[in-house]
Amino acid sequence: MLRTLSLGRCFATLAFALFGTIAFAPNVAAADVPNAEHAKMVQDCAKACSDCQRICDMCVTHCAQMLSEGKKEHMAALAHCADCSSFCAAASQIVARGGPMSKLICASCGDCCAKCAAECEKVPGDAHMKACAEECRRCETICKAMAK
């Protein structure tokens, strides 16, 4: 006969399964345990990626509006911002949880942000594009530092 677990025991089991394996992962050396400076860097990187993801999403909407008004110079920026948003969202999640692919995603995210910023900078005189480019440059800098 099947015995059902209480909701509390289910959560406790799930929490241990998720966090217990992370805490006791055999491939994590003692030297890899983050110090306070590293923890701040991780937090700053995850936040920068999250902030960049949001502004890129807003820029996608802005570019779509501009395209509907016949401003075709926004097409390339729209595509770059959509991809950059996805990169930044993934990077923010992976970095925040201290995933083993953090350096890889940070390096890639930094490159993606650089390309997105360059594309947004091609549309001068537009406040949305300028704000997106600035946020992408900030995220690029933090991600590249994190990847080192």
Image: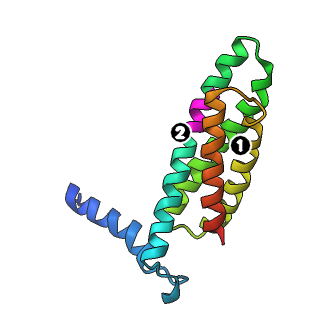
Closer to the N terminus: mark 1 or mark 2?
2
Could you tell me which quadrant the C terminus lies in?
bottom right
Q: Does the magenta stretch include residue 89?
A: no
Which residue sits furthest front? 125
- The local crowd at label 2, few if under 14, some if 14 to 19, many if 20 or more residues have their Cα within 10 Å, is some
Quadrant of the image for the N terminus? bottom left
Q: Mark 1 points at which residue?
A: 117
Q: Which residue lies furthest to the top in this view?
A: 69
Residue 134 quadrant:
top right
Is there any visible trace of residue 112 in the rendered image? yes
Query: Height in image: 134 above or below 28?
Result: above
The mark found on residue 76 in the picture is none
Marks 1 and 2, how far apart at CA: 14 Å
Residue drawn at point x = 62 percent, y = 42 percent = 85
Amino acid bearing label 2: Arg
Secondary structure type for disc 1? helix
Residue 44 in the figure: left or right of residue 3:
right
Indicate the position of residue 79 as horizontal and vertical percent values: 73, 33
> Hey, which quadrant is residue 70 in on the image?
top right
Nearer mark to the viewer, of 1 and 2: 1
SS type, badge 2: helix
Task: Give the residue type at disc 1.
Answer: Ala
At 70% across and 26% down in the image, what residue appears? 125
In the image, taking residue 129 as reference, residue 73 lies left or right, namely right
Q: What stretch is highlighted in magenta?
A: 54-60
Residue 54 image label: 2
The answer to whether residue 97 is seen in the rendering is no
Q: Residue shown at 23%/60% (left/top)?
A: 5
Q: Is residue 129 above or below residue 53?
A: above
Q: Kindly report the secondary structure that dominates the magenta region of the rendered protein.
A: helix
